[in-house]
Image (cartoon, rainbow, N blue to C red):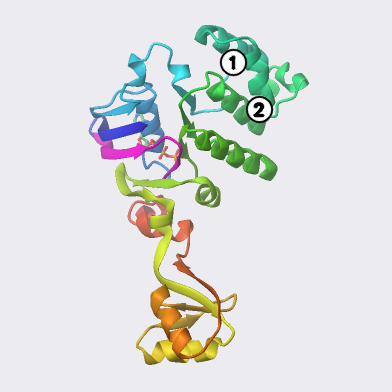
Amino acid sequence: MIEIAHLTKRYGSTTVLDDVSFTAAPGRVTGFLGPNGAGKSTTMRVLCGLATASSGTATVAGRRLRDVPNPGRTVGVLLDASAQHAGRSGREVLTLSARLMGLAPGRVAACLDLVGLTAAEADARTRTYSLGMRQRLGLAHALLGEPDALVLDEPANGLDPAGIRWMRDLLRAYADGGGTVLLSSHLLREVEAVADDLVLIGRGRVLAHGTTADLLSAPGTEVRSLDDGALAGALIAAGHDVRPLDDGGLSTSASAEAVGRHALDARVVLLDLRPARSAGLEDLFFTLTAGSAREEVAA
Ligand SMILES: Nc1ncnc2c1ncn2[C@@H]1O[C@H](COP(=O)(O)OP(=O)(O)OP(=O)(O)O)[C@@H](O)[C@H]1O
């Protein structure tokens, strides 16, 4: 469990985190979203002991990371994929860390394999790596100590579409195995696809925190039937709002039970009945961050 409690961070007179609180739970991927400068990296840096909080706490399994003797075995961190020793090979980078963490040598090869770096790539100096290769190496580094939690800042940056899908599957499998994932990304579709929970932050304050399903749910019901016209008439007559969906079927303010009852009364066969979809994470993001987005500030 990652726990951020009343975290405040000031640089001089500027408050960049203002009473930030949220949790990231084991077995779940928590997406951490916000506009540029919102405070995501600062939160992660404090969590990883790379910056000091002005007040509040950031802990993993109840402990500050700087108090944990072998932190790489507790949390795997990928904050900046370019922060790698340019003159060392990927394999050397991992081998040194594996020794520091007291890991079996076989762990390096296993992690290289896991992130899809070939033997030739692993033996090349990291200064020759593409951004995507650096991200893969950074992820291998994060996974090396078989930690209980991963803290990843923009890990999909630079990955090709196949790499992005691969990372999504990897994070899903890691969380399904009981791991905790805190993931910041500007790729909203990716976050929507993988995150179980979401934290939205703007200008250093938490704007929303909850399950992805709850945050993206919308009131009402979507329905498809063999006679949408008759069903729409019955629903409107009963006082419900109804609008046609772009891809066929109806969206209505009525509950699923009410739709079912009106369909029964109108003798309309239902084909599909489900909770209404919201406009998606992108709309939620822009709605919630409207007051804190850089472009809004400039406008
Ligand atoms: N060392 C520092 N000294 C002064 N201000 C800082 C420092 N580090 C970060 N900041 C400020 O803190 C604010 C939050 O920055 P942070 O990097 O946490 O944002 P972010 O949400 O990660 O943004 P991005 O999406 O651009 O990566 C910004 O206004 C930034 O200028």
Measuring from the top left, give residue 205's x and y in whole percent: 29, 44
Assign the magenta stretch its main secondary structure.
strand
| Quadrant of ligand 1 in image | top left
**How far across and how far down the image is residue 189, in percent?**
54, 52
The mark that comes first in sequence, 2 or 1, is 1
What residue type is disc 2 on?
Leu
Tell me if residue 88 can be seen.
no
Residue 144 occupies quadrant: top right
Above or below, 193 relative to 137: below
Q: Classify 10 Å Cα crowding around label 1: few (below 14), some (14-19), many (20 and above).
A: few
Q: Nearer the viewer, residue 162 or 110?
A: 110
Answer above or below: position of 226 versus 296: below
CB within 8 Å, label 2 to label 1: no
Residue stretch rendered in magenta on the structure = 14-33
One can see residue 278 in this view: yes
Percent position of residue 68, x then y: 37, 15
Kindly identify the residue that appears in the image at 66 percent across and 15 percent down.
Answer: 91
Q: Residue at x 39, y 27 (%)?
A: 45
Residue named by callout 1: 85
The residue that mark 2 highlights is: 114
- How far apart, in angstroms, are the residues tagged by discs 2 and 1? 21 Å
Does the magenta-highlighted stretch encompass residue 31? Answer: yes
Q: Secondary structure at mark 1?
A: loop
Q: Residues within 10 Å of mark 2 (few under 14, many from 20)?
A: some
Q: Looking at the rendering, in which quadrant would you find the C terminus?
A: bottom left
Q: Give the position of the N terminus as an image quadrant.
A: top left
- Amino acid beneath label 1: His
